[in-house]
Amino acid sequence: MPVKEKPRPLGPEDLAAIRWRLDGATLKEISDDRDALRELGERLDGPLADELDNVARAGLLSVRAEVYRLLDELGMAAAASRLALAHAESAGDVQAIVIAQAELAHVLRLRGDYQEADRLFEQAASSEAPDQLRSVVHENAGRSAFDQGRHMEALDHFTRAVRLGLPEDQELIQRIDVALEAIYIHVLRDGWGPYPRLRREILGLVKAADAEQGS
């Protein structure tokens, strides 16, 4: 009898195969293939039930969180990403922690919880994770700043995203171009907004008023 081949483990690369676009007005990710997303979500059930390694579980849960987020099921996305972060922290794996932090922050941004989202983005961006991963963190932190009318801060994040990203990453350049155009339109209408916050202010180590007096 032929041996049945074991299914290939699921991971972030499966989600990468599903295309999404960046809305130029809101800087939110939109997927037009919701059926494929739901199918991927269902395919995650088995691997999650079988996987015992904390790092691997964190990765799978981060993928599940992203699926829910793209489906706009933000409550489920938040629950999955918080669980992913718990597994990553239990394993002490820096890269898994940063991925889970960034995904949870992304979900919180969409829910309007900017304070916790920005704190997580800042923690992830200042980690020892690889440059390419921190590039993604800065890109999403820039979108969060954009939502809040913090256009100078958003511009700083997008600049860092490009510097940390791969020079040949044309998709990154295209997304940043979309973001810069959105900033340009909003600056013409509303101005640049507040000055960029200090790191300790974002992390909640100092109040905004104290930060302004110390600047």
Image (cartoon, rainbow, N blue to C red):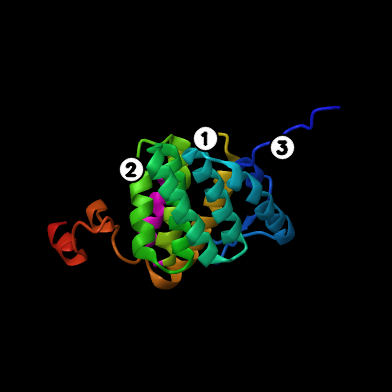
Residue drawn 62% across the image and 44% down it: 47
In terms of depth relative to the viewer, which is nearer, 26 or 53? Answer: 53
The location of residue 55, given as percent across then percent down, is 48, 39
* Range shown magenta: 148-160
Kind of residue sitting beneath label 1: Leu
Name, please, the residue furthest toward the bottom: 189
Say if 108 sits above or below 121 in the image. Answer: below
Q: Name the residue under label 1.
A: 166
The location of residue 11, given as percent across then percent down, is 60, 41
Question: Label 2 neighbourhood size at 10 Å, few (<14), some (14-19), many (20+)?
Answer: few
SS under mark 2: loop
Q: Nearer the viewer, mark 2 or mark 1?
A: 2
The location of residue 200, given as percent across then percent down, is 23, 53
Q: Which of marks 3 and 1 is in front?
A: 3
Kind of residue sitting beneath label 3: Pro
User: How far apart in space, not on screen, are marks 2 and 1 (Cα)?
Assistant: 18 Å
Tell whether 44 sits left or right of 128: right
In terms of depth relative to the viewer, which is nearer, 48 or 111? Answer: 48
Say if 137 sits above or below 2 in the image. Answer: below
Find out whether the residues at labels 2 and 1 contact each other: C-beta distance under 8 Å. Answer: no
SS under mark 3: loop
Residue drawn 38% across the image and 42% down it: 90
Residue drawn 47% across the image and 49% down it: 84
Q: Mark 2 points at which residue?
A: 126
154 within the magenta span: yes
Q: Residue 193 carries which label?
A: none
Tell which circle, 3 or 1, labels the residue nearer the N-terminal end. 3
Q: Mark 3 points at which residue?
A: 7
Find out whether the residues at labels 3 and 2 contact each other: C-beta distance under 8 Å. Answer: no
User: How far apart in space, not on screen, are marks 3 and 2 (Cα)?
Assistant: 36 Å
Tell whether 51 sits left or right of 133: right
Tell which circle, 2 or 1, labels the residue nearer the N-terminal end. 2
